[in-house]
Amino acid sequence: MKKAWKIIASAAVTVGLLTGCGGGSGTAASGDTIKIGVNYELSGDVATYGQANVEGIEMATEEINNAGGIKGKKIELVKYDNKSTASEATTLATKLMTQDKVIAQIGPATSGAFKATIPVADKSKVPVVTGSATADDVTVDAQGKVQQYAFRTCFSDSYQGTAMAKYAREKKNAQSAVILTDNSSDYSKGLTASFEKTFTEAGGKVVSKQSYNKGDTDFNAILTAIRGQQFDMIYLPGYYSEAGLIIKQARAQGITQPIVGADGFDSPKLAELAGKDALTNVFFSNHYSSLSTDPAVQKFITDFKAKYNKEPDAFNALGYDTLKFVANGLQGGATTGADLEKALAATKDFQGVTGTISVDANHNAVKSVTVIEMRNGVQAAAEKFDA
Amino acid sequence: MEQLIQQLINGLALGSIYALIALGYTMIYGIIQLINFAHGDIFMVGAFVGYAGMTTLRLNFFASLALAIITCLLLGVLIERVAYKPLRKQTRLAVLITAIGMSFLLEYTMMYFVGPDPRAYPALPDFMRATIKITDNIVITGAQILILAVSITLMIALQLIVRYTRIGKAMRAVSQDPDAARLQGINVDTTISFTFAIGSALAGAAGVLVGVYYNSINPLMGILPGLKAFVAAVLGGIGIIPGALLGGFLIGGVETLVAGYGFSSWKDAVVFAILILILILKPSGLLGKNVKEKV
């Protein structure tokens, strides 16, 4: 780990030296502190995502500052609430970058709001980093060109589909699958496409595809339609509110095959809706699991409990990693947003609690997924899987 | 073939829920020519009262069902007295708009108290989790049998009340001609209240059954089933009690078959297409000729 840091640091310093003279637009890191903008959903529809991210960010900041800061400078967070709207997020991004002169912005949590801040970042040459915007088109624009100043520390939606298809083929030896898609969600459709492509290419067969809509409660019809068929597993890339009911109704109909999902399953509501007995032989991909035996993760969990008096969830961990990821970039001595962008783009093997992160050419995080197994309504096992 | 039979069983369970809600729509329409758009939300309140009965008050299933029925019965009467009765001499449009307002009031009052997230119904008693295997591919669940049994019992009770009691006779009289009924000494207000009471009680029962069957309730759960039950009532012939039953089962069956044969995303569209077709082809509904049955 130390070695990796040294390489990144030296790379960043080199880049900094080469380009240092050309910059001069930012005075962000001058003075006694390094200002980092925090632009999150602290109220509104998806406030829980934003609040959880910020808890992780604040904890990481405290750790770094208690350990002496970055090259002697403490991190100062400039925190604003974007009220879960994209327009407010854009306004705040402008404010952070022009008035507060931050060196980087962390957030927003959701893909739509995050994308809205990217044009501002481009104009101000300040990197924006998110821990939880997973839509596929976040870091590349419509023409497929990479967004220079946008980064994320989470994997993209389609990556989860690819990873779970490989997991099913390689680890579970599934020959055939049924896919149940939430037709009203881009998230679900994207996962379906990437899963189907990878699963078929790896020699698997998709025997049936069924769809449902957000808010449906009766899935007996589509489950009856698949029950008579031969298949090894069900891929169900949906959110917990419908997935819980589908799992319950499937088990009630006597469908016992493994049900595999994605991070939309990650809610205590899943077990409530499905019922403890039904929620067995269910697997899903996620960013993080508290069951990990990695000492860094266990330390994170202990520290988090000490600070907030509750178990950390995936968003807490992603927020924590995102701040540490930016701090890692700053270790190279970047003083402007443009310098920091180059340091972040060069990140390799950064050790976070949600996995080992490298940044690829499209500014996506290359990292392992965590596959969580549910047994009798509780998380029973977790393993990391590299696609 | 087996799959078709299984789908029909699924459709029957769903259809009986639509039928229970549709009965309330059709009775209220029959007596004051009002499409009570708050009816779907009374169904939602029933689901939440049943939930409270089973969790907070720790009652068993049947006691919770009774509690939900009684609460909805009183709520239905209260809504009629407060919101609709003062407007009885106004245009029908005024009452209709009031009904829509009442619907939103119920939805968002409930959301204020319980939040928008779906809630899981408490675990079912064992007898309802049992399944009966007829063949390998035809399975009837205990919950499905329960839904059918409760629905049919309530429908028979309703039929008996309407046919053989004094108040039932009064309901039929008021639905035919309120003024003539009043001249005969029938208390029209009481009769209308009674109709709201029965219709709302059935919706409350349907709410608990849906909670038990699907295990998920939320404050906006009444909107879509309410609209579909309305379609069922129109399909059977609005104002006609057997029509609501027929319409409910037909809509439940059609929806299940459409979803089961690969058109899941279209199932709601098909239901509302049926509404448009029936309004064009036979606006009085499938059983529409039998005007004397109006209640």
Image (cartoon, rainbow, N blue to C red):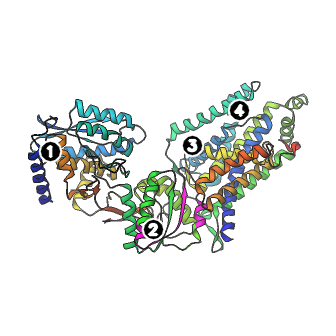
Q: Is residue A83 visible?
A: no
**Cα–Cα gap, marks 1 and 3:** 48 Å
**Cα–Cα gap, marks 3 and 2:** 31 Å
Query: Quick check: marks 1 and 2 in contact, CB under 8 Å?
Result: no
- Secondary element type, mark 2: loop
**Cα–Cα gap, marks 1 and 2:** 44 Å
Which of the 4 image quadrants contains residue A34?
top left
Q: Which residue does the numbered mark 1 point to in the structure image? A: A66
Q: Badge 2 sits on which subunit?
A: A
**Amino acid beneath label 4:** Glu
What is the x, y in percent for residue B81?
71, 30
Discs 3 and 2 carry the same chain letter:
no
What is the x, y in percent for residue A245?
53, 57
**Amino acid beneath label 3:** Leu
Q: Earlier in the sequence, mark 3 or mark 4?
A: 4
**Amino acid beneath label 1:** Asn
What quarter of the picture does the N terminus of chain B occupy? bottom right
Start-end of magenta stretch:
A198-225
Q: Is residue B82 visible?
A: yes
Q: Badge 1 sits on which subunit?
A: A
Q: Which residue does the numbered mark 4 point to in the structure image? A: B80
| A275 to the left or right of A136 | right
* Front residue of A306 and B180: B180
